[in-house]
Amino acid sequence: MGFNDVYDYVDGKLDWLAAGLPTEGTNTLVPRAGDVARSDAPTCRMDETIDDVQERVKAGGWDACVVVNDEHVVMGLLRSKELEEKGRPVEHVMRPGPSTFRPHVSILEMATFMREHDLKNSPVTTSDGRLVGLLYREDAEREAHESHSHDDHAAGDAP
């Protein structure tokens, strides 16, 4: 039939979206958590000392670090408070098993949730727990506002 690169993705559409894989159609115009999350967020390992991580994170201008394993699966999170610790292993000061969100969650939903739960940032992961990036509430709120403003203007332009 002339089709190339055909795949049978048995895990389904929701898993495809949760993995942050590309999509098509009008729904792709809606900003998602994975689009806004900062993929360059600092990461560290549980066996590092907080002092080493602290220097690296602060030098990059960050206030959080995502703790990952060798497969880049999120194991914990270090926020400002934990980054103030001294001389201890990351494993002993990290927030274990932080709440994570999938890349396909709308940015408006994320901004609302983060505001309501007073989350300054949150890891965005694939369905198997691999880090996509760190989403900051300020980024989510800005993108949600810009997206909503754009939708209002587009609706006003309709005949």
Image: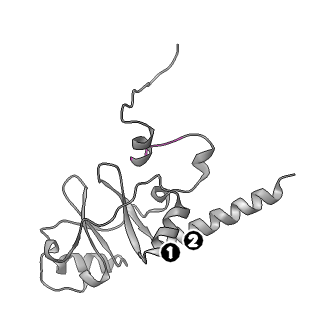
> How far is the residue under mark 2 from the one under mark 1?
6 Å
Q: Main secondary structure of the magenta part?
A: loop
Q: Which residues are magenta?
A: 19-23
Residue at 52% x, 13% y: name it. Answer: 1
Residue that protrudes farthest toward the front in the picture: 116
In the image, 124 versus 41, the foreground residue is 124
Q: Position of residue 106 (x, y in %)?
A: 52, 57
* Element at label 1: helix
Q: Quadrant of residue 66?
A: bottom left
| Tag 2 near tag 1, CB within 8 Å | yes
State the residue at coordinates (50%, 74%): 138
User: Between residues 143 and 42, which one lies in front from this camera angle?
Assistant: 143
Mark 2 lies on a secondary structure that is helix
Note whether 101 is above or below 5 in the view shown.
below
Dot 2 amino acid type:
Arg
Check disc 2: other Cα within 10 Å, few if <14, some if 14-19, many if 20+. some
Identify the residue under disc 2: 142
- For residue 97: magenta? no
Q: Position of residue 111 (x, y in %)?
A: 51, 68
Query: Is 40 rendered above or below residue 20?
Result: below
Residue 131 in percent (x, y) is at: 32, 57
Q: Amino acid at mark 1?
A: Glu
Extreme-top residue of the structure: 1
Q: Which residue is mark 1?
A: 138
